[in-house]
Amino acid sequence: MNNRLLLVFLLLAPALAFGQDAGPVAVPEASEKAMSYYYTTSTLWVINLMWGFVVPALFLFTGWSAKIRDWARRLSPKWSVMILVYFVVFSLLTTLIQLPLDYYGQFAVEHEYGLSDQALTKWITDQLIGFLVSTLIGFIAVLGIYRALRASPQRWWFYSGLVAIPFVVVIILISPIWISPLFNKFGPMKDKALEAKIVALAERAGIEGARVFEVEKSVDTKTVNAYVTGVFDTKRIVLWDTILKKLDDRQLLFVMGHEMGHYVLHHVWQFVVFLCALIMLSLYATQRLAHGLIERYRRRFGFERLEDIASLPLMMLVVSLVFLVAMPAFNGFSRYVEHQADIFGLEITRDGHSAGTAFARMQVDDLVNPRPNPILHWLRGNHPTLAERIEFTNRYRPWEQGQPLKYGGEFRK
Protein backbone atom coordinates (compact mmCIF):
# COMPACT_ATOMS: atom_id res chain seq x y z
CA MET A 1 0.00 0.00 0.00
CA ASN A 2 1.53 3.33 -1.06
CA ASN A 3 1.64 6.32 1.24
CA ARG A 4 -1.33 8.10 -0.38
CA LEU A 5 -3.60 5.06 -0.05
CA LEU A 6 -2.44 4.59 3.53
CA LEU A 7 -3.32 8.21 4.32
CA VAL A 8 -6.81 7.83 2.78
CA PHE A 9 -7.38 4.62 4.77
CA LEU A 10 -6.36 6.27 8.05
CA LEU A 11 -8.69 9.21 7.39
CA LEU A 12 -11.65 6.97 6.54
CA ALA A 13 -11.14 4.34 9.24
CA PRO A 14 -12.86 6.25 12.08
CA ALA A 15 -15.88 6.98 9.88
CA LEU A 16 -16.13 3.36 8.78
CA ALA A 17 -15.88 2.15 12.36
CA PHE A 18 -18.55 4.65 13.46
CA GLY A 19 -20.97 3.34 10.87
CA GLN A 20 -20.52 -0.32 11.82
CA ASP A 21 -20.91 -2.36 14.96
CA ALA A 22 -17.66 -3.54 16.47
CA GLY A 23 -19.05 -6.90 17.52
CA PRO A 24 -20.67 -8.08 20.77
CA VAL A 25 -20.08 -6.00 23.87
CA ALA A 26 -18.55 -7.91 26.76
CA VAL A 27 -20.03 -7.52 30.24
CA PRO A 28 -17.30 -5.88 32.33
CA GLU A 29 -16.28 -7.72 35.46
CA ALA A 30 -17.26 -5.91 38.63
CA SER A 31 -14.28 -4.31 40.31
CA GLU A 32 -13.46 -4.87 43.96
CA LYS A 33 -14.61 -1.32 44.63
CA ALA A 34 -17.93 -1.94 42.86
CA MET A 35 -18.55 -5.10 44.90
CA SER A 36 -17.74 -3.27 48.13
CA TYR A 37 -20.22 -0.53 47.15
CA TYR A 38 -22.83 -3.18 46.32
CA TYR A 39 -22.49 -4.86 49.72
CA THR A 40 -22.55 -1.51 51.53
CA THR A 41 -25.66 -0.21 49.76
CA SER A 42 -27.42 -3.58 50.08
CA THR A 43 -26.79 -3.57 53.83
CA LEU A 44 -28.08 0.00 54.05
CA TRP A 45 -31.20 -1.02 52.11
CA VAL A 46 -31.96 -3.74 54.65
CA ILE A 47 -31.30 -1.38 57.58
CA ASN A 48 -33.55 1.31 56.09
CA LEU A 49 -36.25 -1.27 55.49
CA MET A 50 -36.17 -2.38 59.13
CA TRP A 51 -35.89 1.21 60.35
CA GLY A 52 -39.12 2.00 58.52
CA PHE A 53 -40.90 -0.35 60.93
CA VAL A 54 -38.89 0.43 64.07
CA VAL A 55 -39.50 4.19 64.09
CA PRO A 56 -43.34 4.13 63.83
CA ALA A 57 -43.45 1.29 66.37
CA LEU A 58 -41.32 3.37 68.72
CA PHE A 59 -43.80 6.26 68.56
CA LEU A 60 -46.69 3.88 69.10
CA PHE A 61 -45.53 1.68 71.95
CA THR A 62 -43.85 4.46 73.93
CA GLY A 63 -47.00 6.60 73.74
CA TRP A 64 -45.04 9.45 72.10
CA SER A 65 -47.61 9.75 69.33
CA ALA A 66 -50.42 10.29 71.85
CA LYS A 67 -48.30 12.84 73.75
CA ILE A 68 -47.68 14.83 70.54
CA ARG A 69 -51.43 14.76 69.88
CA ASP A 70 -52.17 16.01 73.40
CA TRP A 71 -49.67 18.84 73.01
CA ALA A 72 -51.11 19.79 69.61
CA ARG A 73 -54.63 19.74 71.02
CA ARG A 74 -53.63 22.05 73.88
CA LEU A 75 -52.02 24.40 71.37
CA SER A 76 -55.20 24.65 69.28
CA PRO A 77 -58.66 23.15 69.79
CA LYS A 78 -59.41 23.55 66.09
CA TRP A 79 -59.24 20.09 64.51
CA SER A 80 -57.42 20.99 61.26
CA VAL A 81 -54.82 23.10 63.11
CA MET A 82 -54.29 20.29 65.61
CA ILE A 83 -53.69 17.88 62.70
CA LEU A 84 -51.20 20.33 61.18
CA VAL A 85 -49.27 20.81 64.43
CA TYR A 86 -49.19 17.06 65.12
CA PHE A 87 -48.01 16.23 61.60
CA VAL A 88 -45.28 18.89 61.50
CA VAL A 89 -43.91 17.82 64.91
CA PHE A 90 -44.15 14.12 64.05
CA SER A 91 -42.44 14.67 60.67
CA LEU A 92 -39.68 16.74 62.25
CA LEU A 93 -38.95 14.14 64.94
CA THR A 94 -38.94 11.18 62.53
CA THR A 95 -36.71 13.13 60.13
CA LEU A 96 -34.23 13.90 62.91
CA ILE A 97 -34.19 10.25 63.98
CA GLN A 98 -33.58 9.19 60.37
CA LEU A 99 -31.00 11.93 59.70
CA PRO A 100 -27.80 10.07 60.75
CA LEU A 101 -28.71 7.12 58.54
CA ASP A 102 -29.58 9.43 55.63
CA TYR A 103 -26.32 11.32 56.06
CA TYR A 104 -24.28 8.14 55.99
CA GLY A 105 -26.13 6.53 53.08
CA GLN A 106 -26.72 9.58 50.90
CA PHE A 107 -23.62 11.66 51.62
CA ALA A 108 -20.79 9.81 53.36
CA VAL A 109 -20.96 6.59 51.33
CA GLU A 110 -21.28 8.41 48.00
CA HIS A 111 -18.19 10.48 48.81
CA GLU A 112 -16.29 7.48 50.13
CA TYR A 113 -16.74 5.65 46.83
CA GLY A 114 -16.07 8.70 44.66
CA LEU A 115 -19.60 9.00 43.27
CA SER A 116 -20.22 12.52 44.53
CA ASP A 117 -18.47 15.85 45.05
CA GLN A 118 -21.56 17.41 46.66
CA ALA A 119 -20.80 20.05 49.27
CA LEU A 120 -22.21 19.42 52.73
CA THR A 121 -24.04 22.75 52.60
CA LYS A 122 -25.80 21.65 49.39
CA TRP A 123 -26.82 18.35 50.96
CA ILE A 124 -28.20 20.12 54.04
CA THR A 125 -30.08 22.62 51.87
CA ASP A 126 -31.60 19.80 49.81
CA GLN A 127 -32.64 18.03 53.00
CA LEU A 128 -34.41 21.16 54.26
CA ILE A 129 -36.18 21.72 50.94
CA GLY A 130 -37.15 18.05 50.78
CA PHE A 131 -38.51 18.20 54.31
CA LEU A 132 -40.67 21.24 53.55
CA VAL A 133 -42.03 19.80 50.31
CA SER A 134 -42.72 16.33 51.72
CA THR A 135 -44.33 17.80 54.84
CA LEU A 136 -46.67 19.95 52.77
CA ILE A 137 -47.68 17.09 50.48
CA GLY A 138 -47.92 14.68 53.41
CA PHE A 139 -50.13 17.05 55.41
CA ILE A 140 -52.59 17.37 52.51
CA ALA A 141 -52.76 13.58 52.20
CA VAL A 142 -53.10 12.97 55.95
CA LEU A 143 -55.73 15.68 56.35
CA GLY A 144 -57.78 14.07 53.57
CA ILE A 145 -57.50 10.57 55.04
CA TYR A 146 -58.53 11.62 58.55
CA ARG A 147 -61.42 13.71 57.21
CA ALA A 148 -62.63 10.59 55.41
CA LEU A 149 -62.20 8.60 58.64
CA ARG A 150 -64.36 11.05 60.56
CA ALA A 151 -67.02 11.17 57.85
CA SER A 152 -67.17 7.43 57.12
CA PRO A 153 -65.40 5.16 59.65
CA GLN A 154 -66.24 2.04 57.59
CA ARG A 155 -65.71 3.20 54.00
CA TRP A 156 -62.96 5.77 54.51
CA TRP A 157 -60.33 3.53 52.92
CA PHE A 158 -62.33 3.31 49.68
CA TYR A 159 -62.98 7.05 49.39
CA SER A 160 -59.38 7.86 50.29
CA GLY A 161 -58.15 5.39 47.69
CA LEU A 162 -60.30 7.02 45.01
CA VAL A 163 -59.05 10.51 45.90
CA ALA A 164 -55.47 9.18 45.85
CA ILE A 165 -55.68 8.68 42.07
CA PRO A 166 -55.98 12.35 41.04
CA PHE A 167 -53.69 13.31 43.94
CA VAL A 168 -50.88 11.06 42.69
CA VAL A 169 -51.43 12.23 39.10
CA VAL A 170 -51.15 15.89 40.11
CA ILE A 171 -47.94 15.23 42.05
CA ILE A 172 -46.43 13.43 39.05
CA LEU A 173 -47.40 16.28 36.71
CA ILE A 174 -46.11 19.12 38.88
CA SER A 175 -42.98 17.41 40.19
CA PRO A 176 -40.72 17.92 37.12
CA ILE A 177 -41.98 21.47 36.61
CA TRP A 178 -42.19 22.89 40.13
CA ILE A 179 -40.44 20.52 42.54
CA SER A 180 -37.31 19.22 40.76
CA PRO A 181 -36.07 22.77 39.90
CA LEU A 182 -36.04 23.52 43.63
CA PHE A 183 -33.03 21.22 43.95
CA ASN A 184 -31.08 21.79 40.72
CA LYS A 185 -30.73 24.36 37.95
CA PHE A 186 -32.59 23.51 34.73
CA GLY A 187 -31.34 25.28 31.62
CA PRO A 188 -31.26 25.00 27.83
CA MET A 189 -29.05 22.34 26.31
CA LYS A 190 -25.63 23.68 25.42
CA ASP A 191 -24.86 21.24 22.58
CA LYS A 192 -27.34 22.43 19.95
CA ALA A 193 -26.27 19.83 17.38
CA LEU A 194 -26.99 17.00 19.83
CA GLU A 195 -30.23 18.71 20.85
CA ALA A 196 -31.35 18.70 17.21
CA LYS A 197 -30.67 14.95 17.00
CA ILE A 198 -32.67 14.31 20.19
CA VAL A 199 -35.60 16.42 18.97
CA ALA A 200 -35.58 14.58 15.64
CA LEU A 201 -35.59 11.23 17.48
CA ALA A 202 -38.47 12.43 19.67
CA GLU A 203 -40.50 13.44 16.64
CA ARG A 204 -39.88 10.03 15.09
CA ALA A 205 -41.18 8.49 18.33
CA GLY A 206 -44.31 10.65 18.08
CA ILE A 207 -43.29 13.12 20.79
CA GLU A 208 -43.71 16.59 19.34
CA GLY A 209 -43.22 19.99 20.91
CA ALA A 210 -41.06 18.80 23.81
CA ARG A 211 -38.49 21.20 25.23
CA VAL A 212 -35.01 19.88 26.00
CA PHE A 213 -33.42 20.74 29.35
CA GLU A 214 -29.92 20.19 30.70
CA VAL A 215 -29.79 19.82 34.49
CA GLU A 216 -26.79 20.89 36.54
CA LYS A 217 -26.71 17.64 38.49
CA SER A 218 -22.93 17.28 38.74
CA VAL A 219 -23.09 19.42 41.90
CA ASP A 220 -24.80 16.45 43.56
CA THR A 221 -23.58 13.26 41.90
CA LYS A 222 -21.39 11.66 39.26
CA THR A 223 -24.07 9.11 38.34
CA VAL A 224 -26.26 9.61 35.26
CA ASN A 225 -29.91 9.95 34.37
CA ALA A 226 -32.31 11.26 31.75
CA TYR A 227 -36.09 11.18 31.34
CA VAL A 228 -39.08 12.36 29.29
CA THR A 229 -42.10 13.72 31.13
CA GLY A 230 -45.08 16.08 30.99
CA VAL A 231 -48.18 16.47 28.83
CA PHE A 232 -49.33 19.05 26.31
CA ASP A 233 -47.29 22.26 26.73
CA THR A 234 -45.34 20.84 29.69
CA LYS A 235 -43.64 18.06 27.72
CA ARG A 236 -39.93 18.07 28.43
CA ILE A 237 -36.85 15.97 27.69
CA VAL A 238 -34.38 16.20 30.55
CA LEU A 239 -30.73 15.13 30.62
CA TRP A 240 -28.37 15.41 33.57
CA ASP A 241 -25.11 17.12 32.67
CA THR A 242 -23.31 14.03 34.00
CA ILE A 243 -24.70 11.81 31.25
CA LEU A 244 -23.74 14.37 28.60
CA LYS A 245 -20.15 14.25 29.80
CA LYS A 246 -19.88 10.46 29.92
CA LEU A 247 -21.63 9.15 26.80
CA ASP A 248 -21.05 9.88 23.14
CA ASP A 249 -23.86 10.97 20.80
CA ARG A 250 -24.82 7.49 19.65
CA GLN A 251 -24.94 6.13 23.18
CA LEU A 252 -27.02 9.13 24.30
CA LEU A 253 -29.48 8.63 21.46
CA PHE A 254 -30.09 5.04 22.59
CA VAL A 255 -30.61 6.21 26.19
CA MET A 256 -33.06 8.84 25.00
CA GLY A 257 -34.79 6.25 22.80
CA HIS A 258 -35.20 4.13 25.94
CA GLU A 259 -36.66 7.08 27.88
CA MET A 260 -38.95 7.97 24.98
CA GLY A 261 -40.14 4.37 25.03
CA HIS A 262 -41.33 4.86 28.62
CA TYR A 263 -43.26 7.92 27.52
CA VAL A 264 -44.78 6.51 24.33
CA LEU A 265 -45.73 3.19 25.95
CA HIS A 266 -47.42 5.01 28.87
CA HIS A 267 -45.34 3.30 31.54
CA VAL A 268 -45.73 6.19 34.00
CA TRP A 269 -49.51 5.87 33.90
CA GLN A 270 -49.27 2.11 34.31
CA PHE A 271 -47.22 2.75 37.45
CA VAL A 272 -49.86 5.21 38.65
CA VAL A 273 -52.53 2.49 38.37
CA PHE A 274 -50.26 0.00 40.18
CA LEU A 275 -49.38 2.51 42.91
CA CYS A 276 -52.96 3.63 43.48
CA ALA A 277 -54.09 -0.01 43.73
CA LEU A 278 -51.38 -0.57 46.36
CA ILE A 279 -52.49 2.54 48.25
CA MET A 280 -56.10 1.37 48.34
CA LEU A 281 -55.03 -2.13 49.38
CA SER A 282 -52.88 -0.62 52.16
CA LEU A 283 -55.73 1.50 53.46
CA TYR A 284 -58.09 -1.48 53.37
CA ALA A 285 -55.53 -3.57 55.29
CA THR A 286 -55.33 -0.76 57.83
CA GLN A 287 -59.10 -0.87 58.27
CA ARG A 288 -59.04 -4.64 58.79
CA LEU A 289 -56.00 -4.86 61.08
CA ALA A 290 -55.83 -1.61 63.02
CA HIS A 291 -58.97 -1.97 65.12
CA GLY A 292 -57.80 -5.27 66.65
CA LEU A 293 -54.38 -3.82 67.44
CA ILE A 294 -55.92 -0.73 69.00
CA GLU A 295 -58.22 -2.87 71.14
CA ARG A 296 -55.28 -4.93 72.36
CA TYR A 297 -52.75 -2.14 72.95
CA ARG A 298 -54.94 0.94 73.51
CA ARG A 299 -53.37 1.68 76.90
CA ARG A 300 -49.87 1.68 75.50
CA PHE A 301 -50.90 3.49 72.32
CA GLY A 302 -52.87 6.17 74.18
CA PHE A 303 -55.82 6.22 71.78
CA GLU A 304 -58.95 4.12 71.23
CA ARG A 305 -60.08 5.00 67.71
CA LEU A 306 -58.43 4.86 64.32
CA GLU A 307 -59.74 8.35 63.47
CA ASP A 308 -57.52 9.75 66.24
CA ILE A 309 -54.48 11.42 64.58
CA ALA A 310 -52.26 9.64 67.12
CA SER A 311 -52.94 6.48 65.09
CA LEU A 312 -50.80 7.78 62.20
CA PRO A 313 -47.73 5.64 63.12
CA LEU A 314 -49.99 2.56 63.22
CA MET A 315 -51.28 3.38 59.77
CA MET A 316 -47.69 3.82 58.57
CA LEU A 317 -46.77 0.39 59.94
CA VAL A 318 -49.59 -1.37 58.10
CA VAL A 319 -48.92 0.53 54.86
CA SER A 320 -45.20 -0.34 55.10
CA LEU A 321 -46.08 -4.00 55.63
CA VAL A 322 -48.33 -4.09 52.56
CA PHE A 323 -45.71 -2.38 50.41
CA LEU A 324 -43.05 -4.80 51.67
CA VAL A 325 -45.18 -7.80 50.69
CA ALA A 326 -45.97 -6.22 47.32
CA MET A 327 -42.38 -5.12 46.67
CA PRO A 328 -41.31 -8.17 44.59
CA ALA A 329 -44.39 -7.78 42.35
CA PHE A 330 -43.91 -4.03 42.01
CA ASN A 331 -40.21 -4.41 41.15
CA GLY A 332 -40.98 -7.29 38.81
CA PHE A 333 -43.39 -5.05 36.90
CA SER A 334 -40.74 -2.32 36.85
CA ARG A 335 -38.16 -4.70 35.37
CA TYR A 336 -40.69 -5.70 32.72
CA VAL A 337 -41.37 -2.14 31.56
CA GLU A 338 -37.65 -1.32 31.63
CA HIS A 339 -37.09 -4.24 29.28
CA GLN A 340 -39.85 -2.93 27.02
CA ALA A 341 -38.17 0.47 26.96
CA ASP A 342 -34.85 -1.20 26.05
CA ILE A 343 -36.53 -2.86 23.09
CA PHE A 344 -38.06 0.46 22.03
CA GLY A 345 -34.68 2.19 22.26
CA LEU A 346 -32.96 -0.54 20.26
CA GLU A 347 -35.61 -0.54 17.55
CA ILE A 348 -35.79 3.21 17.08
CA THR A 349 -31.98 3.61 16.91
CA ARG A 350 -31.04 0.17 15.49
CA ASP A 351 -27.74 0.55 17.31
CA GLY A 352 -27.24 -2.38 19.64
CA HIS A 353 -23.52 -1.81 19.93
CA SER A 354 -23.90 1.74 21.23
CA ALA A 355 -26.59 0.52 23.63
CA GLY A 356 -24.29 -2.18 24.98
CA THR A 357 -21.32 0.15 25.34
CA ALA A 358 -23.54 2.72 27.10
CA PHE A 359 -24.61 0.11 29.63
CA ALA A 360 -21.01 -1.04 30.08
CA ARG A 361 -19.81 2.53 30.62
CA MET A 362 -22.54 3.21 33.19
CA GLN A 363 -21.77 -0.05 34.96
CA VAL A 364 -18.12 0.78 35.40
CA ASP A 365 -18.54 4.48 36.23
CA ASP A 366 -21.49 4.03 38.62
CA LEU A 367 -19.96 1.02 40.41
CA VAL A 368 -22.79 -1.35 39.51
CA ASN A 369 -22.65 -5.08 40.19
CA PRO A 370 -23.75 -6.59 36.83
CA ARG A 371 -24.74 -9.91 38.40
CA PRO A 372 -26.30 -9.20 41.82
CA ASN A 373 -27.55 -11.84 44.23
CA PRO A 374 -30.71 -13.30 42.61
CA ILE A 375 -32.83 -13.20 45.77
CA LEU A 376 -31.80 -9.65 46.63
CA HIS A 377 -32.38 -8.59 43.03
CA TRP A 378 -35.84 -10.20 43.10
CA LEU A 379 -36.65 -8.19 46.21
CA ARG A 380 -35.22 -4.77 45.35
CA GLY A 381 -34.10 -4.71 41.71
CA ASN A 382 -36.30 -2.39 39.64
CA HIS A 383 -34.24 -2.80 36.44
CA PRO A 384 -32.96 -5.93 34.71
CA THR A 385 -29.36 -6.61 35.70
CA LEU A 386 -26.80 -4.85 33.54
CA ALA A 387 -25.42 -8.22 32.48
CA GLU A 388 -28.88 -9.13 31.16
CA ARG A 389 -29.26 -5.80 29.40
CA ILE A 390 -25.85 -5.90 27.71
CA GLU A 391 -26.34 -9.50 26.58
CA PHE A 392 -29.79 -8.62 25.21
CA THR A 393 -28.38 -5.73 23.14
CA ASN A 394 -25.90 -8.17 21.62
CA ARG A 395 -28.56 -10.55 20.31
CA TYR A 396 -31.68 -8.47 19.67
CA ARG A 397 -31.49 -7.29 16.03
CA PRO A 398 -34.69 -8.25 14.20
CA TRP A 399 -34.12 -5.54 11.57
CA GLU A 400 -31.05 -7.42 10.33
CA GLN A 401 -33.12 -10.58 9.66
CA GLY A 402 -36.02 -8.68 8.11
CA GLN A 403 -38.27 -9.56 11.06
CA PRO A 404 -41.05 -7.19 12.19
CA LEU A 405 -40.27 -4.77 14.97
CA LYS A 406 -42.27 -5.06 18.17
CA TYR A 407 -42.82 -1.31 18.36
CA GLY A 408 -42.31 -0.38 14.72
CA GLY A 409 -45.91 0.79 14.50
CA GLU A 410 -45.12 3.56 16.98
CA PHE A 411 -42.44 5.14 14.80
CA ARG A 412 -43.10 7.91 12.33
CA LYS A 413 -41.38 7.84 9.00
Image (cartoon, rainbow, N blue to C red):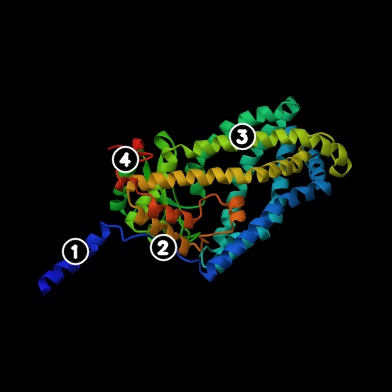
Q: Quadrant of residue 104?
A: bottom right
Callout 4: 10 Å neighbours few (<14), some, many (20+)?
Answer: some
N-terminal of the pair, mark 3 or mark 2, is 2
C-alpha span from label 4 to label 3: 34 Å
- For mark 3, what is the residue? 277
Q: Amino acid at mark 2?
A: Ala
Amino acid carrying label 4: it is: Arg
- For the residues bearing labels 4 and 3, Cβ distance under 8 angstroms: no
Q: Nearer the viewer, residue 329 or 261?
A: 329
Q: CA distance from mark 2 to mark 1?
A: 26 Å
The amino acid marked with disc number 1 is Leu
Q: According to the image, label 2 marks what residue? A: 26
**Which residue is at a point 49% across and 62% down the rendered structure image?**
366
User: On the image, numbered disc 4 is attached to which residue?
Assistant: 204
Q: Measure how far apart labels 3 and 2 are at the Cα level.
A: 40 Å
| Of callouts 1 and 4, the N-terminal one | 1
**Which mark is drawn over residue 12?**
1
Quadrant of the drawing holding the N terminus: bottom left
Side (left or right) of 303 relative to 133: right
